Amino acid sequence: MTYETVSVEKNGRLATLTLNRPQSMNAMNALMMKEIAEALEWLHEEKDVQVLLIKGEGRAFSAGGDIKAMLDPESPMDIDTVMGDVSRLAKALYTLPMVTIASVHGAAAGLGLSLVLGCDVVIAEENSKLAMNFIGIGLIPDGAGHFFLKERVGIPKAKQLIWSGKVLNGHEALSLGLIDEVTAEGRAYEQAELSAAKFLSAPLKAMIASKQILHTQHVHELERVLALESSSQSAMRRTKDHLEGIQAFVEKRKPSFKGV
């Protein structure tokens, strides 16, 4: 499969999905969201693949949604189409019949963090910057961010992370149970490859069967969360706080929110 914003490589039972908009720190525009969803859905049909490694090209895993694209008057985002692709992405990731490993360096923010948290194993460098920071532009987490956060840290801590938008380094994220392993700077992908190799030498068929048993019982909950995120995000995009948030971001100033 050939894409513009991502790449997928297969090497036997291992596949690697690379986010590939390095000039934008892998910020996700509408095309990238669509292509990630398509790539993950395509991988469902690759029955020989048992481990998937997800990483970002360049200086970061992903800076999240492309805020500048949200403001582009010549090519405005169709929020309903975008949310449909984001929901496809999250469901395809959660239901993949393979072990998924996220290799995080630099920023993993917003939708980028949702993608990371949807993986079975998360390995991040100590200087990584992980943040569920939708709140900074008056939005809510999407890409099943609510669902994946709750699975990782529980409801009370999920609310705190969503409401604060706090940026966490690798050690802070590990202490909260948000990720599974911390490495030195520049070593996350190397460690992710070692982790993949260990899985590939294990009885993976049995491990994937256990994953499917544990995940299948929550698919309906995931679908409900995605539907609520989609409707709520569409509503948030129309608020004055959201407009203020993205304008403040572009103007590099602190936003002045009014709760409307």
Image (cartoon, rainbow, N blue to C red):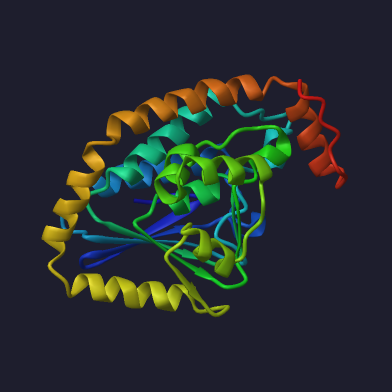
Q: Which of the image's four quarters has the C terminus?
A: top right
Query: Residue 92 lies in what quarter of the image?
Result: top left
Can residue 174 be seen in this snapshot? yes
Would residue 83 be found to the left or right of residue 260 on screen?
Answer: left
Q: Name the residue at 27% across, 47% down.
A: 96
Q: Relative to the observer, which residue lies in front, 252 or 153?
A: 153
Give residue 99's position: percent from left, percent from top.
27, 58
Residue 46, visible in the rendered structure: no
Left or right: residue 180 compared with residue 83: left
Residue 9 in percent (x, y) is at: 34, 62
Q: Position of residue 20 (x, y in %)?
A: 52, 57
Quadrant in the picture for residue 195: bottom left
Could you say which is closer to the camera, residue 165 or residue 89? 165
Depth order, front residue of 86/195 = 195
Q: How many marks?
A: 0
- Residue at 48%, 40% (x, y): give it: 155
Question: With 51 as the anchor, is 136 left or right in this view?
Answer: right
Where does the image place residue 102, in percent across and percent down from the top left?
42, 61
Task: Work out whether 2 lies above or below 69.
Answer: below
> Is 82 left, or right, of 240 in this rendering?
left
Residue shown at 46%/59% (left/top)?
177
